Image (tube, rainbow, N blue to C red):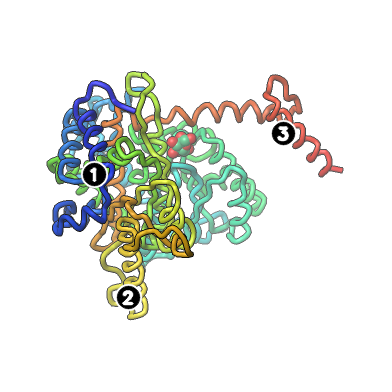
Amino acid sequence: MAMTGIAAWVELQIHAEEFKGAHLKDLFEQDAKRFETFSFSYDKYLLDLSKQRINQQTLNNLIDLARQQELPSWIERLFNADKVNDSEQRAALHMALRQPKGASLQHEGKDVVSDVQASLAKMQILVEQIQNAQWRGYDGRPISSVVNIGVGGSSLGPLMVCDALEKYAPADTVTLDVHFVSSMDGSELEKLLPKLDPATTLFIVASKTFTTVDTLANANTAREWLLAASKQPVELINQHHFIAATASPSAAESWGVPISHQLLLWDWVGGRYSLWSVIGMPIALKVGMAQFRELLQGAHQMDKHFRQAPLASNLPVLLGLMGVWNINFLGIHAHAILPYDGRLAQFPAYLEQLEMESNGKSVNRDGQRIAYRTCPVLWGQVGSNAQHAFYQLLHQGTEPVMCDFITPAVRYDGEGDELQKQHQLSLANCLAQSRLLALGDSREPESDGASKFKHYDGNQPSTTLMLDALTPETLGGLIALYEHKVFVQSVIWQINPFDQWGVEQGKKVATSLLTQLGSGLGDGLDASTDGLLRHIQQQTRGAGQ
Ligand code: F6P
């Protein structure tokens, strides 16, 4: 499947045809300096592409492709607040959220950085009130538990970062339990609420639009719980137990959150790019505002690298182009994200939204159906756990899969010998798995006997991304690296990564089905949905008898 009219695309197809028989084992044997040639470092990040099925020609051709697709000018358009989200006529200015104080970025005649700083300052006041035990619940006791109610970008990013940076919780303030609930069916709240004291629990309703039914349903259930436990008027409960993080202040106010307890973001912050904004309040509550600012700083450094570094040594560009090579030229349509660090357990789920909601598109910026592949299926898990789960498929299945191995080089410094050994064990496994996936085993497959089941073909490509250590700063950089990688791929594929029309229609269909569930009328439905509806009604009647 080809992109027409792009010479570098055709060059890459020819090159891939010539190169497709190459095995990573041979590539390593032929070139002792392969690591030096194909690993790239910037600041505290090392990107090793030597286990990708590439040679210098591949990289040169990919850089040509990036140039022919005008990547440098697209990067400038992104940073200059152009309306790169063309289907919604919006800029995508998540980088402004991590600009330092004093910087400036004009958007529609306004300096957005000063707005951002004002919003963060308000967030800091609320965070410090809560952390210093000055925010009181309905019976006068200070808040000890915070529950973030949100879904998608209003949950996955903050959840992932809170989990990753837990050990950075400040020692000199109240230790807050920070929880996340998303699921529409109420099961997370059902489990969590009995463990919480309503008088000391604060809910953050995180919703950019403040229309997401999942979030509003959970918020309503939380408020019902508070009202039942407290026997207080709803205004008092709203005042003491809810904060809203939103771009729709009027909707949040109509629901009941007073303006003074609202934290604002803007329509130019995409949901899946919003953890840097007030949507990141749970992060600041968990690890403190100073560490939250370090996270922003790490991302800002990566922004500068992305904007300034030459294409051939630009980490997000190289990461994005590797994906394009694997997907469009080597026919690899599955991507596993494998952190070898339990603190990054939520990172694959976070990337699932970032990558698949951004680039899961089949129509280009001009609205034309495209004839080449875009975002692959992406999933993952902590690598060492996945070794005992789905690595069998990576090693011996029929599906080619590209893998990202992510690990810090150093961990547990001064925290005891046994933990140090555990980190060494994890590193050894990380390196062993990427090595075996690349090289396979040395034996030739035998045609008979048990050994034929034990053969490893190898030649599964992978990238290893090594951080010096996992800190708020490097985590910020890591996330920004993937954000920009997604943008790079969108430019190559000529798609808009900042809209998500594909999630809208399902919401409408669900709204009309909800009415039909209530009325029992399944008119106009397909036979399957009608049959399921009738079955639910029978079961519901049965349960009520
Ligand atoms: O339905 C998808 C989506 O719109 C995501 O893009 C977004 O992150 C999520 O829902 C939550 O949206 P909101 O923050 O507006 O509740």
Q: Is residue 118 visible to the viewer in this orientation of the structure? A: no
Give coordinates of residue 178: x percent, y percent: 47, 57
Q: Looking at the image, is mark 3 or mark 2 earlier in the sequence?
A: 2
Residue at image position (54%, 38%) is 256
Identify the residue at image location x=59%, y=27%: 509
At mark 1, the secondary structure is helix
Describe residue 539's horizontal placement relative to residue 330 as left or right. right
Q: Residues within 10 Å of mark 2 (few under 14, many from 20)?
A: some
Query: In front: 26, or 385?
Result: 26
Q: Which residue is pictured at 59% across the width and 51% down the height?
A: 189
| Front in this rendered view, residue 83 or 389 | 389
Where residue 49 sits: x, y (%)?
Answer: 23, 51
Query: Residue 532, labelled with which disc?
Result: 3
Q: Amino acid at mark 2?
A: Gln
* Label 1 Cα crowd, 10 Å radius (few <14 / some 14-19 / many 20+): many
Mark 2 vs 1: CB contact within 8 A: no
Choose top left, top right, bottom left or bottom right for residue 385.
bottom left
Q: Position of residue 296 (x, y in %)?
A: 27, 49
Which amino acid type is marked by label 3? Answer: Leu
Relative horizontal placement of residue 97, taking residue 149 as reference (left or right)? left
Secondary structure state at the residue bearing disc 2? helix
Q: Is residue 25 above or below residue 500?
A: below
| Mark 1 vs ligand 1: CB below 8 Å | no
